[in-house]
Image (cartoon, rainbow, N blue to C red):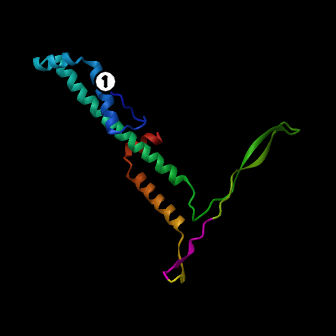
């Protein structure tokens, strides 16, 4: 057996990991050799089998790490998006034009790299109708903002619950 799941790899499902492990297992020792050596209590076979268990544990730990890493990256990407209730300001960046002035300095220009987005209204009016066709209007919290806040809370919970070894690996 060998360690075939490394930290940072795409995470595998349990079934994928077991299937890959079995392929390695089958390729390393012929079936009849394993059976014969198991019956005989062969020391080399027992050492090989013990290493199999050890490496399989490493694969399991690394795969769990990779699942946590993927979830952490998704959550931080979600948190990096602007808050819909707050909107987003325009961002300009100074970029070179490829031209030079008389003194040999590069000519810079201000370029819009992020457009502004107006904040959403905190509340919206919703009209509901009864069976008689009479409508009633009520003011409710904007459902888009409510959903945005819920997604942010869920993402923050993932970030807060991420094991320290994952956050250290991302930061390092």
Question: Does residue 165 appear left or right of residue 114 in this picture?
Answer: left
Question: Does residue 22 appear left or right of residue 122 in this picture?
Answer: left
| Whether residue 1 can be seen here | no
Relative height, residue 106 to residue 76 (above, below): above
In the rendered image, residue 74 lying in the magenta stretch gets the answer no
Residues in magenta? Answer: 119-131
Q: Residue at x 40, y 38 (%)?
A: 11
Relative height, residue 124 to residue 153 (above, below): below
Q: Pinpoint residue 128: horizontal percent, then vertical percent.
A: 52, 77
Q: Residue at x 56, y 60 (%)?
A: 83
Find disc 1 in the rendering and name its residue: 24
Q: Residue at x 34, y 34 (%)?
A: 16
Q: Residue at x 45, y 55 (%)?
A: 155
Query: Which residue is more in the foreground, 101 or 159?
Result: 159
Question: Does residue 42 appear left or right of residue 13 in this picture?
Answer: left
The answer to which image quadrant residue 120 occupies is: bottom right
Q: Residues within 10 Å of mark 1 (few under 14, many from 20)?
A: some
- Farthest residue, direction right: 102
In the rendered image, residue 127 lying in the magenta stretch gets the answer yes
Query: Which residue is more in the foreground, 126 or 25?
Result: 126
Looking at the image, how many numbered discs can be counted on the residues? Answer: 1
- Farthest residue, direction front: 132
The answer to which image quadrant residue 1 occupies is: top left
Secondary structure type for disc 1: helix
Q: Pinpoint residue 158: horizontal percent, then vertical percent.
A: 41, 52
| Whether residue 12 can be seen here | yes
Q: Pinpoint residue 42: horizontal percent, then vertical percent.
A: 14, 17
């Amino acid at each position: 057996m060998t360690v075939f799941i490394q930290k940072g790899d795409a995470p595998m499902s349990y079934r994928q990991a077991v299937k890959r492990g079995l392929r390695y297992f089958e390729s390393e020792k012929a079936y009849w050799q394993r059976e014969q050596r198991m019956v005989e209590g062969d020391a080399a076979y027992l050492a090989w089998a013990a290493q199999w268990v050890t490496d399989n544990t490493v694969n399991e730990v690394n795969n769990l790490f990779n699942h946590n890493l993927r979830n952490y990256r998704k959550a931080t990407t979600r948190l990096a998006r602007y808050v819909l209730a707050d909107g987003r300001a325009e961002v300009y960046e100074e970029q070179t034009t490829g031209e030079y002035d008389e003194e040999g300095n590069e000519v810079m220009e201000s370029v819009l790299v992020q457009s502004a987005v107006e904040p959403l209204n905190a509340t919206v009016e919703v009209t509901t109708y009864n069976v008689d066709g009479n409508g009633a209007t009520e003011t409710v919290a904007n459902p888009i903002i409510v959903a945005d806040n819920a997604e942010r809370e869920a993402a923050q919970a993932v970030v807060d619950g991420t094991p320290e070894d994952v956050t250290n690996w991302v930061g390092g």
